[in-house]
Every structure is written in C-alpha cells, then in structure tokens.
Image (cartoon, rainbow, N blue to C red):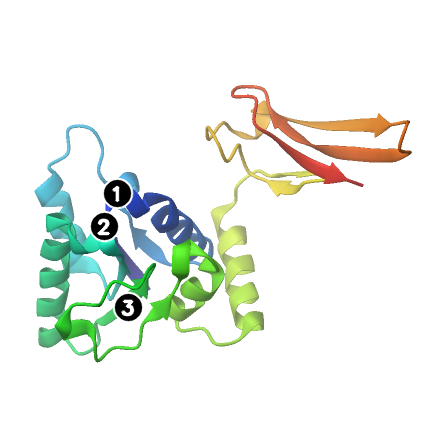
Amino acid sequence: MNVFLSYNKADKDVARTIGAQLKLSGADVWFDEWEIRAGDSIPGKLDAGLRAFDTFALIWSRHAKRSQWVRAELEAAISRSIADEAVRLVPIKLDTTELPALLQRLRYVDLPDGADVHRAVMAILGIDSERDFLRAMQMGIEGLDLPYGYFHGYGIAFGCPRCGAGLRSLRGWHETDWARDDEYAGVRCEECGWNNGGEV
C-alpha cells in the first residue's frame, strides 16, 4: 500500500503518528517531513507523491479547511480517483468541520482531537481484525531490522521520542522509594533529558 498523508501543519503531530504506525505496518508512506529535504523542489516532490499513491489519507480539521496546500492536494487526489477507481480517498476528521462536498459520500474515520490513532490506521489499511493488525505490525517491525532495547518500567524503545537520538543515547534507570516501599524504573535520554517510566 502506498499512502499519501495530506494535512495542515497545525495537525502535524497526529499526521506523524499515523504515518509512523502505517510505516510500521509495512505501508509506503508519503509524509512531507520524510520526503522533502533541504534543496528539494517542493512542487516537484509533491507531484511525484501525488502520482504514486493508491490511498490518499486526508487529515481533516478546521486548519486543513483553510489550507491552500491541502486544497491543492485534495483536488489532485479527486482527479486521480475519478480516473482510477482503485484509488481510495480516506477522510480522517479531527473535529466537527464539515467535509468538502465531493467527500461527503465517503465513509470517514472520526478521530476527535487525534485520539485513537490505532483505529484510524486500521481503517486506512483496511484491516478489521486486531490480530491482522498485530501481525502486520510485527512483520513491519521485523522488516525494518532496527536495533531496539527493552527498558524495565518503560518497554521497548528504538530511540528517544523527543529528540530522535538513537538507542546508544538511552539509559535505563532504577530507583527505590524506601519511605513508600516502592520501586520505579524506566529510561532516559542522555542527549535531551527526556525521561519516562513507572512503578515496577
């Protein structure tokens, strides 16, 4: 599956999370932050992405409605879907903003405030079963062949979610609260200071 993510920059965090889960599930994802580098032609890269997708995921919100870029991407996607019935348009609504008239006949994913991204990703992939989703995620992760670490109190980590530092910058920690007779563990990033964990 080749997914083009269309969104407004105000909704970038949700778009990035959706894109990451799609990638982990084995989909090819066109996400501007990952595709357009310094010195690249923005219109050229967009044109290439809009010619290659088979699924257009529109992250729709009050911000997207006002965006000229989103409007242009949507127009290109609608043109492709008219010419090729195999192309899917998947609206993902983050708020109550009404969908454009040409999309109102489509089934959309309701994702208020970006909650339950997992459900949106399953809808984009066309997966109904949790088992099928987990199988796709496992195969995607294995295919990436990334180094990872397990940190007691936190879980599996590939890198720092705040600054993007690699596994070598992550350190596990363990502390005891003698007054409460509790133990805590987790992971911290030596580059940016990010820290997470919990009671063990």
Instruction: Give the mark nearer the N terminus: 2 vs 3.
Output: 2
Q: Amino acid at mark 1?
A: Lys
Res 24 seen here: yes
- Residue contact between numbered discs 2 and 1, judged by CB atoms under 8 Å: yes
Residue 39 drawn at (x, y percent): 15, 28
As drawn, the label of residue 90 is 3
Crowd around label 2: few <14 · some 14–19 · many ≥20 (10 Å): some
Res 152 seen here: no
Q: Disc 3 to disc 1, how far (Cα)?
A: 19 Å
Q: Which residue is mark 2?
A: 63
Q: Is residue 91 left or right of residue 182?
A: left
Q: Which residue is painted at 57% across and 30% down in the image?
A: 167
Q: Amino acid at mark 2?
A: His
Residue 146 drawn at (x, y percent): 52, 41
Q: Is residue 60 left or right of residue 119?
A: left
As drawn, the label of residue 9 is 1
Residue 50 drawn at (x, y percent): 15, 56
Disc 2 or disc 3, which is closer to the eye?
A: 2
Q: Is residue 12 left or right of residue 118?
A: left
* Extreme-top residue of the structure: 191
Residue 114 drawn at (x, y percent): 41, 55
Residue 13 higher or lower than 134, as above or below: above
Disc 2 or disc 1, which is closer to the eye?
A: 2
Secondary structure at numbered mark 1: helix
Secondary structure at numbered mark 2: helix
Crowd around label 3: few <14 · some 14–19 · many ≥20 (10 Å): many
